[in-house]
Image (tube, grey):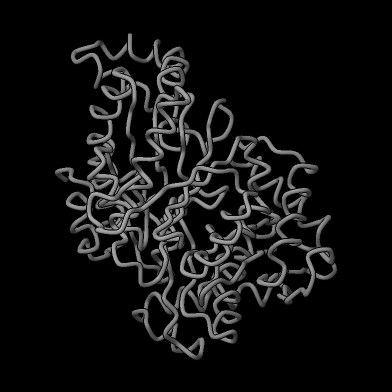
Amino acid sequence: MPSRHSPVTVQVLAAEPDDPRVREAWETLAAEGSLHYTPAWFAALAPDVGERLIVFLALRADRPAALLPAFVARRPRDAVHHPRRAVLGAGQMIQILAALVPGLPSLIARVAQRPLLGVVDRLLLPGLVFTSPFGYASEVLIAPGDPDPDGAIDALLAAAQAWASAHRLRILAALWLGGPQTRLLAALRRAGYAIGAVRATYRLRVPWSAFDQYLASFHSARRVRLRHEMATFARGGLNVVRVETWSAIEAPAVRLAVALQQRYGERISVETLTRRYRRAAEYLGHAALYLAAYRGTDLVGFVAAFQHNGVLYPKFVGFDYAVSETWFVYFNLVYYRLLEAAMALGIREIYYGPSADAGKLLRGCDIEPVYCGYRALSRGADRLVRRYLPRLHRQTVERTRALLARLDRDPAPLAGWGEAAGVAD
């Protein structure tokens, strides 16, 4: 498909991930992306998505210019990869009803919210979803030095839309746009996607060479609090060790992780997480950092993090909450000890991702928006997203503004959230 911008024609190939041309291009282009868009990450985690993976590859003069993977979501099964569930929960159905039917009495809306879940699923499924498996990321990989990366991305999105239409899909969705994906965000706007900020994400820059320098970056009252958490951890007789192989802690670590996910309403089995973590160790073990917290001989917490391009990604965690809440196991393991390990490795940034907003802000993380973008191919879905997303965006901004105010943090990072999405804050 020719680019609108480039004098050199861009051809787009839509293929399975095991296509030799795709494999070779992906290995090359992944060097410039995040951990979540490496072939190793997809190989380890994509099998658990349970949906077909299609890769769109833009070629310029037979050389890779850009690459965009996508899942074909057909079943309402997973919150991370589903066009509705990643963004719209049951409690938000009232807001959707209000957007679609102005003046609808709230009581009727409350009664109707759960049946509406099925209606919304029928509007949005099947869909083509640009996302990483369990990575909370939507990215495009671009060849370094390409003469027209915007043209290559435009060609990818046009090809993806044509493919979705030919396969009778109802929507295209980029669910987790954040960080450096400004080119993809701008391209989605050019392609007519409805876009809104749906949550915040967090990263900790690591300019320090010693932990005391990190502590010195906080005001005195905050330093006292962090030192208290570390002293309490030490007083509890806990210690943290670096584990060389996943197999050394697998069984107790999986039990802790399952208990953690069940605590937050996720139904997942020991068998499922065991398979997932083993595949991660198989494909990503070369980049892994495993930290384990012990009280005596009992494992009471762990974090599995992975390095890529100077960034450390803590991805899998588990804790004994009875111990953690008393002795601050979570904060010591996932922040303080992980930061010490990162500095020893020369890491320049720790990417913590979304959720646990206050805890991340209070420990020095920078805040960034996460956007979602939808291009509906049916009238009903288009009406839904274009009425609802601006409202969701404004709620996200106001909720984040209130959080920053409560923590006495500067609201300046919120500037530009709406401009990037083309939505008024």
343 left or right of 119?
A: right
Given residues 184 and 289, the one toward you in this image is 184
- Residue 393: image x %, image y %? 26, 41
245 left or right of 302?
A: right
**Residue at the image position 54 percent from the left and 77 percent from the top:** 339
**Residue at the image position 23 percent from the left and 34 percent from the top:** 391
Say whether residue 211 is visible. yes
Count the numbered circles shown: 0
Q: Is residue 206 above or below residue 104?
A: below
**Residue at the image position 70 percent from the left and 45 percent from the top:** 259
Given residues 120 and 238, the one toward you in this image is 120
Q: Is residue 417 above or below residue 203?
A: above
Q: Is residue 152 above or below residue 333?
A: above
Given residues 410 and 329, the one toward you in this image is 410
Given residues 49 and 302, the one toward you in this image is 49
255 left or right of 15?
A: right
- Residue 387: image x %, image y %? 23, 27
Q: Quadrant of residue 415?
A: bottom left
- Residue 186: image x %, image y %? 25, 52
Q: Quadrant of residue 324?
A: bottom right
Say whether residue 315 is visible. no
Q: If the image is split into quadrants, where does the N terminus sit?
A: top left
- Residue 6: image x %, image y %? 25, 57
